[in-house]
Image (tube, grey):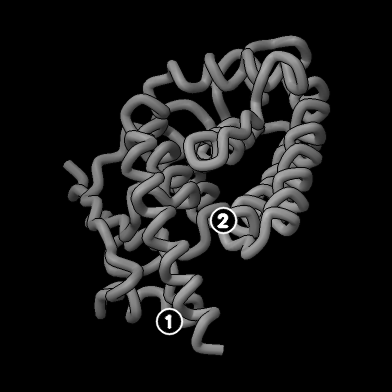
């Protein structure tokens, strides 16, 4: 019998990028050790494993670290190709489309969320919120294109783009809780609203996504940190 791999994931429970990787591991049914990190007091293991960015997530497989959530998800999909469902599409064109929209989500959605949380004035916050609405509008169109009328971005079951968007639903809930803004609703984005409900009922989402109240408390802690940093400039 082959030896069980030494697999560790360094993460933070409310990070969308960590949530994405945990969803991928859950989809594949891969056993691993999850090690929560305090990003205000980074561990030596994190600093050694991610010396360039010093960020989570980091997947450590048999002592070798893999950084950056899209790269980690692809690594998981390839290493455990014979385990669980495929995460990335097999078709080259569909794979390229999924990668494009995943990059779009990473480049646009989280920065707009962070900008909203960091905004010093209502005008700045409104600008960032409008950017969020624009991003969600694009994702509404992406869902129509990618799903081909089926339940998920990947078709009949969740795939790479589903977890890339789905891991950010927690952030949207944080903003709704803090500012009363609904980013996924039946009026503006009916396809995404229906998808989000279905996605939230999947095992991957139920098992991995933390309670929104935990994320709100962390967001407030981050806001205080950003405010203190701005005050010292």
Residue at the spot of label 1: 51
Position of 62 relative to 131 (above/below): below
Q: Residue furthest bottom?
A: 233
Residue at the spot of label 2: 117
Mark 1–mark 2 distance (CA, rounded to whole Å): 27 Å
The quadrant the N terminus occupies is: top left
In screen coordinates, is 211 left or right of 223? Answer: left
Answer with the quarter of the image where residue 129 lies: top right
Q: Which mark is residue 37?
A: none
Q: Position of residue 153 (x, y in %)?
A: 67, 25
The quadrant the C terminus occupies is: bottom right
Q: Residue at x 50, y 76 (%)?
A: 53
Answer with the quarter of the image where residue 80 lies: top left
Position of 222 relative to 148 (above/below): below
Depth check: give the residue in front, 137 or 47.
Answer: 137
In screen coordinates, is 201 left or right of 100? Answer: left
Position of 41 relative to 25 (above/below): below
Q: Is residue 66 visible?
A: no
Dots 1, 2 in contact, CB < 8 A: no
* Disc nearest the viewer among 1 and 2: 2
Secondary element type, mark 2: helix
Depth check: give the residue in front, 172 or 176.
Answer: 176
């Amino acid at each position: 019998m082959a030896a069980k791999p030494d697999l560790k994931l360094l993460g933070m429970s409310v990070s969308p990028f960590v949530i994405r990787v945990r969803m991928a591991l859950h989809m594949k049914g891969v056993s691993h050790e999850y090690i929560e990190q305090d990003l205000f007091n980074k561990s030596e293991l994190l600093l050694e494993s991610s010396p360039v960015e010093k960020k989570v997530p980091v997947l450590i497989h048999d002592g070798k670290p893999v950084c950056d959530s899209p790269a980690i998800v692809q690594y998981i999909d390839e290493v455990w190709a014979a385990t669980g469902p495929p995460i990335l599409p097999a078709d080259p064109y569909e794979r390229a489309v999924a990668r494009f929209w995943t990059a779009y989500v990473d480049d646009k959605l989280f920065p707009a969320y962070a900008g909203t949380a960091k905004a010093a004035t209502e005008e700045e916050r409104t600008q960032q919120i409008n950017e969020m609405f624009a991003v969600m509008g694009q994702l509404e169109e992406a869902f129509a294109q990618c799903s081909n009328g089926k339940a998920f971005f990947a078709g009949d079951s969740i795939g790479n783009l589903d977890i890339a968007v789905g891991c950010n639903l927690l952030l949207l809930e944080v903003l709704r809780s803090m500012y009363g803004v609904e980013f996924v609703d039946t009026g503006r984005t009916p396809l995404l609203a229906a998808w989000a409900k279905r996605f939230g009922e999947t095992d991957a989402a139920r098992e991995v996504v933390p309670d929104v109240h935990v994320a709100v408390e962390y967001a407030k802690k981050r806001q205080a940190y950003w405010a203190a940093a701005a005050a010292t400039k």
